[in-house]
Amino acid sequence: MTLDWEALQSIFMALAAVFLAAFVLFLLMIAYAVRQLRQIEIPADAGFVETLQLVPLSLVVAIDLLDLSLDFLAAPVAWVLLDRLGLKALRGVSTVEAFIPATQLIPTMTLTWLGVRLLRLGIVEKRP
């Protein structure tokens, strides 16, 4: 089975549509997540697990959508975005994940968020 030019063009157009849809969904999700984050106080010294315990699901889904839509170019965007949102604990992990080949289809941050919550890792207690 050989791929002709029309088949390659169809594959390319389908991938472009998926990436564009992921980017539009990212924009919608990040706007929603920012609204939710305004109601949450995350300590400046919070670690990765504690931060994941506190942030809404919409944020980690948005980061995964950004990674899907921009591939390795998502790393600098995610770094700046998470820095501006005061989520420095998530910057490194999301950036490293963006640079690992073939992980764009795996919602790594979302799975990590679910794992932290389901396994009750690093349960956040009220700080004084």
Image (tube, helix red, strand yellow):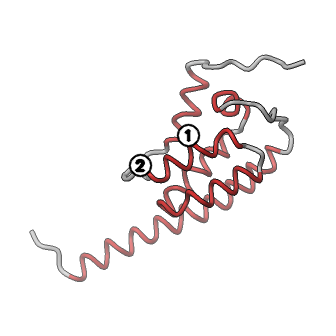
- Pick whichever of labels 1 and 2 is earlier in the sequence: 2
Q: Secondary structure at mark 2?
A: loop
Q: Residues within 10 Å of mark 1 (few under 14, many from 20)?
A: many
Left-right relation of 89 to 68: right
Q: Residue at x 69, y 27 (%)?
A: 50
Q: Residue at x 77, y 49 (%)?
A: 85
For discs 1 and 2, the disc positioned in front in the rendered view: 2
User: What x and y, as percent, mark residue 22?
Assistant: 54, 61
User: What x and y, as percent, mark residue 8?
Assistant: 26, 76
- For the N terminus, the image quarter is bottom left
Occupied quadrant, residue 25: bottom right
Q: Residues within 10 Å of mark 2 (few under 14, many from 20)?
A: some
- 97, above or below 31, in the image: above
- 11, above or below 75, in the image: below
- The residue to which callout 2 is attached is 103
Left-right relation of 51 to 41: left
- 111, above or below 67, in the image: above
User: What x and y, as percent, mark residue 17?
Assistant: 46, 70
- The residue to which callout 1 is attached is 110
In the picture, the disc for residue 98 is: none
* Residue closer to the observer: 49 or 26: 49
Q: Type of residue at label 2?
A: Thr
Q: Residue at x 72, y 43 (%)?
A: 87
- 8, above or below 59, in the image: below
Q: Type of residue at label 1?
A: Thr
Q: Residue at x 67, y 61 (%)?
A: 27
- Mark 1 vs 2: CB contact within 8 A: no
Q: Determine the residue located farthest toward the right in the rendered image.
A: 128
* Residue closer to the observer: 25 or 101: 101
